[in-house]
Image: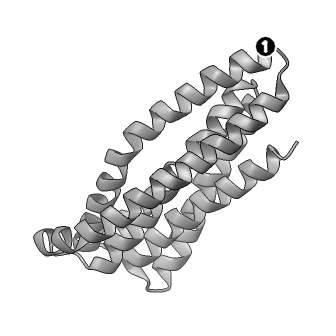
Amino acid sequence: MSMAKLLGPADYGILAVLMSIVYIFTIPSEAIQTVISKYVAILNVKNESGKIKDLLIRSLKKGFFISSILFVIFVIISFIISEFLNISNYLLILTGLLIFLVFLIPVIRGLFQGVRKFLSLGENLLIESISKLIIAIVLVYFGWKVYGAMIAVIIGTLISLIIGLTTLKN
């Protein structure tokens, strides 16, 4: 609601389109979280924390690799999409950065679920949401418009990723 009020109809429409693109890529990432959660739960019951750590590292590496490939493909396709939707290519590249992070964050959240750290999972989700909201309001208020909103979503997701990794350090 704050973005609709601060951006106005045209810019809010652009933001909605960009977020819809992100949501399309979010669907497979939810499956990643479920799979990670299942395997971590099995390993957690067997008290195999070394294997959980190995699974986390391998999953993050694969997620980074898949994200990198998707980002490059998305950047190439973004030139076509920007012409078709009449949206700045830079906004689409920012959307690509967000898609890059969307395949990393479910690994951490799946691990939280698998080891039954639901409080940490909830805190991670809450930190992401609050940071996105506050940063977006500030950046949009100071005139960054849709760029500010997209940068805020990227920063909020990155903060959540970093805090999640820090929490899982043990």
Q: Residue at x 62, y 47 (%)?
A: 60
Does residue 10 appear to the left or right of 164 in the view shown?
A: left
Count numbered badges in the picture: 1
Residue 138 place in picture, x, y as percent: 55, 76
What residue is rendered at 70% in x and 15% in y?
Answer: 42
Crowd class of label 1 (few under 14; some 14 to 19; many from 20; radius 10 Å): few
The picture quadrant where one finds residue 13 is bottom left
Residue 125 x/y as whole percent = 63, 44
The quadrant of the image that shows the C terminus is: top right
Quadrant where the image shows the N terminus: bottom left
Q: Give x and y (percent) for residue 56.
A: 69, 39
Quarter occupied by residue 161 = bottom right
Q: Amino acid at mark 1?
A: Val
Q: Position of residue 37 (x, y in %)?
A: 62, 26
Q: Is residue 124 above or below residue 159?
A: above
**Residue farthest to the bottom?**
143
| 4, 165: nearer the viewer | 165
Image-based side of 71 in relation to 125, left or right: left
98 relative position to 106: left or right:
left
**Residue 1 visible from this viewpoint:** no
Under tag 1, what secondary structure?
helix
Q: Is residue 100 above or below residue 151?
A: above
Residue named by callout 1: 45
Task: Specify the quadrant of the image occupied by residue 54.
Answer: top right
Q: Nearer the viewer, residue 12 or 29?
A: 29
- The residue sitting at 27% across, 70% down in the picture is 76
Q: Is residue 102 visible?
A: yes
Color scheme of the displayed model: one colour
- Residue in the picture at 83% in, 22% down: 48
